[in-house]
Amino acid sequence: MSAPDLDQIQSGALADVAAAGSLADLESVRVAHTGRRSPLATVLAGIGGLPPEQRGTVGKAANLARRAVEEALAARTAELEAEELGAALERDTTDVTLPGDPHPLGALHPITQVRQEMEDILLALGYRIADGPEIETEWHVFTALNTPAGHPSRSPSDTFFVGGRPDRLLRTQTSPVQVREMQASEPPIYLVAPGAVYRRDDIDATHSPMFHQMEGLAVDEGLTMAHLKGTMLHFFRELLGSEREILLQPHFFPFTEPSVDVQVSYTDKNGRPGWLELAGAGMVDPNVLAHAGIDSERYTGFAFGCGLDRIAMIRFGVPDLRLFFENDLRFLEQFA
Ligand code: PHE
């Protein structure tokens, strides 16, 4: 095979490569010019049969031709791929260079934010989080908590009874979690139990038939009122600012003795100082310990409960409780 033949084969192949208008055409061109039955393959296969003095030159020329054709094929493939991609993008009206549609990020509800802050303060003191059912028995909500029959909170005008059953009701406080946890575990017990509670109240700026409380319970050897006071002072300073003072005012709860109202200092808009009642608390009544099967000779305990929503109102300066439950994004977005 002479050199002009190879030149012809090469230029024929290169012309076909250049003329291929699509990747599919180019594939046929590749098979025709570099495949097993192509003229170039025939030349290469015949080299062994040439007179020895020709093998070197023809072999070299044939390999150069093959390389030239392969390079042209690779270059044309890249060109056609780019063209076809461009055409596809033009057909598609999507502009892939535009920034994507922003995906709106959610945020935690302000009540959840405050709940988590409160939990964190107590978790750092070694408390654990406990949970209890919202549909409770009268025994857990009232009897075990030393609340006598005939107490106004046991009346259907204050409490939602479920399905007309006198012993099934929506818990009016998170305190029954104290009872369940004391029954289920041995002291030392340090727990915090946040959750929803229900009372028959008409809705207004400071009342809702559903709201949230957070219960705290500590039962151990040697706990006194001093531990309760220190815990409350630390808790409210962490939550509302280190300048806060607290005042314990005598109060009554059936399940604590003595009982107190925890008041926290604040300054109003006009700079006048005052006190806010933010929690109920007290030393766990020995009867309550006994009801839950805890040795009241050996252990003492203190408990506290506060309204999460009310603290969130103060914390965020929200004047109306209803805003928290209306799910208006214009309101909620301000806490994101
Ligand atoms: N459960 C009481 C209430 O709802 C608050 C409280 C909790 C008081 C624990 C004392 C101890 O008002």
Image (spheres, rainbow, N blue to C red):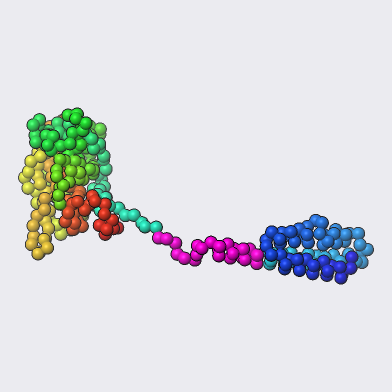
Determine whether 178 is above or below 272 in the image. Answer: above
Region rendered in magenta: 79-102
Quarter of the image that includes the C terminus: bottom left
Q: What x and y, as percent, mark residue 198?
A: 19, 41
The mark total stands at 0
Residue 256 located within the stretch drawn in magenta:
no
Q: What x and y, as percent, mark residue 319?
A: 16, 56
Instruction: Give the image quarter of residue 64.
Output: bottom right
Q: What x and y, as percent, mark residue 138?
A: 17, 31
Residue plotted at (65% across, 67% down): 79
Residue 100 located within the stretch drawn in magenta:
yes
Q: 94 and 138: which one is in front?
A: 94
Residue plotted at (8% across, 34% down): 151
* Residue farthest toward the right in the current orientation of the protein: 51
Q: What x and y, as percent, mark residue 123?
A: 26, 47
Q: Is residue 88 visible?
A: yes
Quarter of the image that includes the N terminus: bottom right
Q: 59 and 208: which one is in front?
A: 208
Say whether residue 289 is left or right of residue 104: left
Q: Is residue 217 visible?
A: no
Q: 113 and 237: which one is in front?
A: 113
Say whether residue 244 is left or right of residue 53: left
